[in-house]
Image (spheres, rainbow, N blue to C red):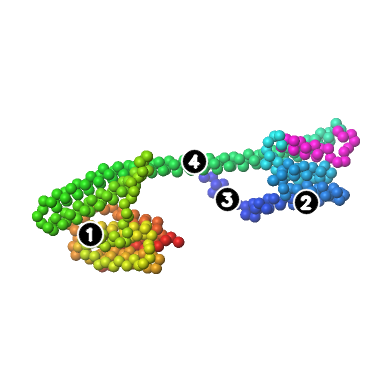
Amino acid sequence: MTPADQLPSRRLPAWCTAPWLMLLLPVLYSLMDAALVARDATWWQMALSTLAAVALFWRRRFPVTVLLLTMPGTWVEAIWLAPITAVYTVATERPGARVLFPCATLFTLVSFFHWPLPTPVIDLSRNTALDAIQAVMLAAGPAATGLLSRTRRELAARLDELTRGQERESRLLAERVLISERGRLAREMHDVVSHQVSLISIQAGALQVSTADPAAAGVARTIRELSVRTLDELRQMVGVLRGTTNGPFPAAPLAPQPRLTDLPRLIEQSGLAADTELNPGDRPWPEAVERAAYRTVQEALTNITKYAPEAVVHVRVRAKGRRLRVEVRNEAPPVHPAEILPGGGHGLVGLRERAQLLGGTLTAGPTQDGGFEVRAELPASRS
């Protein structure tokens, strides 16, 4: 980075680039030019010069007409600023040579053959040559500047179009990479997780049939039901991940998503000694909020089952105005499990992200009595 790049950029005030000001300024300085030139002018000469200046108000809509209106004042009063502005506008708005060249030539002839015409009209002298050069430059300068300005504007538009095209290509590339990654994740989930859960379900079914212990049979039946439900949800997730890579085959429809009414069954199937208070109120909560509340309780109960399976659990789901508060807290466990299932903490991270997307919050941490608490507040809407 150069020292010039490190300097703060200076932008013109908004009033300096206002459209009305850019339209008014040429008229003002052309009127001032006419007033300075018309020292001993008659009223009709002043009228022609004023017409040339005032006509600049319409220079963008009728550039050629405005140029023609500036020629009488230029011929009788030798004003420069109004015709120069008119030629510049023709170059920016009508850049074709068929229009610009005749307009610039007309201005050159009018400024060279100034009224009153001398006698002879053309004198082959040094002064005549200088006047001719001056007339040509007065027309060529604004014409070239106008063409340059138009070219710069077209290049800026083209560059902006190319930038937008590159951004679209970048988004498409990112989407293709995302689709490919989702397909890979779907294959991994199906090949690894589905296989393992299927084996658990088969083993639980075999134990349920072969055991004579009613308690063991009940546990085996619960394991099998949970395994079957897990396989169903896994197939749904694989269908979502592969939904954009199925080609002509539509993605499988999603099964009914869990709601607040499914919480009692979830808590019962967890096998934990839970003190429950479910009072979501009469408000119809959005489906995304109910699903987030369900997943929060589900993840919290799963963690308690892993780390404190014999602890007393308190589950609270209550409405607080326009927010739904979800609290899952376990007391200090009497004993810690000898073997803890592996976990990476991704569940709580995902719950926090889910709550933030809904405009809510989620906190999780140990309590003073040695337990652990997960608390989420989910709004009815983001408004």
Q: Residue at x 83, y 45 (%)?
A: 77
- What amino acid is found at the position of numbered circle 3 in the picture? Ser
- Magenta-colored span: 100-122
Q: CA distance from mark 3 to mark 1?
A: 64 Å
Q: CA distance from mark 3 to mark 4?
A: 26 Å
Labelled pair 1, 2 in contact (Cβ < 8 Å): no
Q: Is residue 346 left or right of residue 69?
A: left
- What amino acid is found at the position of numbered circle 4 in the picture? Gln
Q: Which mark is residue 269?
A: 1
Image quarter of residue 184: top left
Image quarter of residue 220: bottom left
The crowd level at tag 1 (other Cα within 10 Å; few <14, some 14-19, many 20+) is few
- Tell me the element at label 3: loop
- Tell me the element at label 1: helix
Q: Is residue 273 left or right of residue 16?
A: left
Q: CA distance from mark 4 to mark 1?
A: 53 Å
Return the x and y of residue 221 as percentages of the image width and height.
17, 54
Q: Nearer the viewer, mark 4 or mark 2?
A: 4
- What amino acid is found at the position of numbered circle 1 in the picture? Gln
Labelled pair 3, 1 in contact (Cβ < 8 Å): no
